[in-house]
């Protein structure tokens, strides 16, 4: 399975914020869209960074509530690992597990095309296991189509 298969199901809409967005506004965006991270992009197409709930918590812990008035560019991760739609799901699972990423932007020729979350990966894995379980149960009970 490829990342493009996941995007085909979930869609390719990506929530982005410009680098000068305040952390307080970022919190509103995360809550409004019920997501855990956003891509930071000056134009909505190029990945300048990514900022997650974890980044906010770490910044609050180290710098206090004053961080809420800072720009997201002050707390974002700038060295973002991205994948292409052709990436194998197993490789992205491994990347997310080993690097402890929960969100990975999908990029084609430098342009943002989607985001895959750990929730997307887990949902896909559960769906695969359910399909296999059902096929095995049908095989054992003789209810093959």
Image (cartoon, helix red, strand yellow):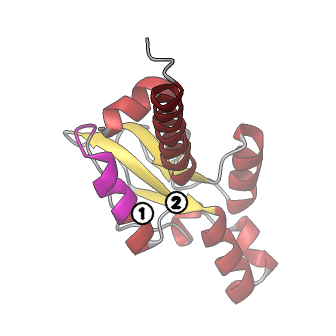
- SS label for mark 2: loop
Q: Earlier in the sequence, mark 2 or mark 1?
A: 1
Q: Residues within 10 Å of mark 2 (few under 14, many from 20)?
A: some
Residue at the spot 55% in from the left edge and 61% down from the top edge:
51
What are the residue bounds of the magenta stretch?
85-94
Q: Which mark is residue 96?
A: 1
Q: Position of residue 10 (x, y in %)?
A: 51, 29
Marks 2 and 1 in Cβ contact (< 8 Å): yes
Q: Is residue 34 visible?
A: yes
Towards the viewer: 84 or 77? 84
Q: Position of residue 85 (x, y in %)?
A: 28, 37
User: Disc 2 to disc 1, how far (Cα)?
Assistant: 6 Å
Q: Is residue 99 left or right of residue 67?
A: left
Residue at the spot 46% in from the left edge and 36% down from the top edge:
132
The quadrant holding residue 92 is: bottom left
The quadrant holding residue 82 is: bottom left
Q: Position of residue 47 (x, y in %)?
A: 37, 50
Residue assigned mark 2: 102
């Amino acid at each position: 399975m490829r990342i493009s298969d996941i995007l085909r199901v979930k869609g390719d809409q990506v929530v982005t914020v410009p680098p000068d967005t305040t952390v307080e506004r970022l919190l509103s965006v995360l809550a409004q869209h019920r997501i855990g991270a956003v891509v930071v992009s000056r134009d909505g197409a190029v990945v300048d960074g990514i900022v997650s709930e974890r980044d906010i918590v770490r910044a609050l812990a180290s710098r206090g509530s004053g961080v809420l008035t800072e720009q997201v560019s002050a707390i974002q991760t700038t060295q973002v690992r991205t994948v292409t739609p052709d990436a194998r799901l197993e490789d992205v699972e491994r990347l997310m597990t080993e690097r402890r990423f929960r969100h990975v932007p999908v990029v084609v020729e430098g342009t943002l095309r989607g985001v895959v979350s750990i929730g997307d990966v887990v949902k896909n894995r559960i769906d695969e296991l359910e399909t296999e379980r059902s096929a095995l149960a049908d095989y054992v009970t003789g209810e093959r189509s």
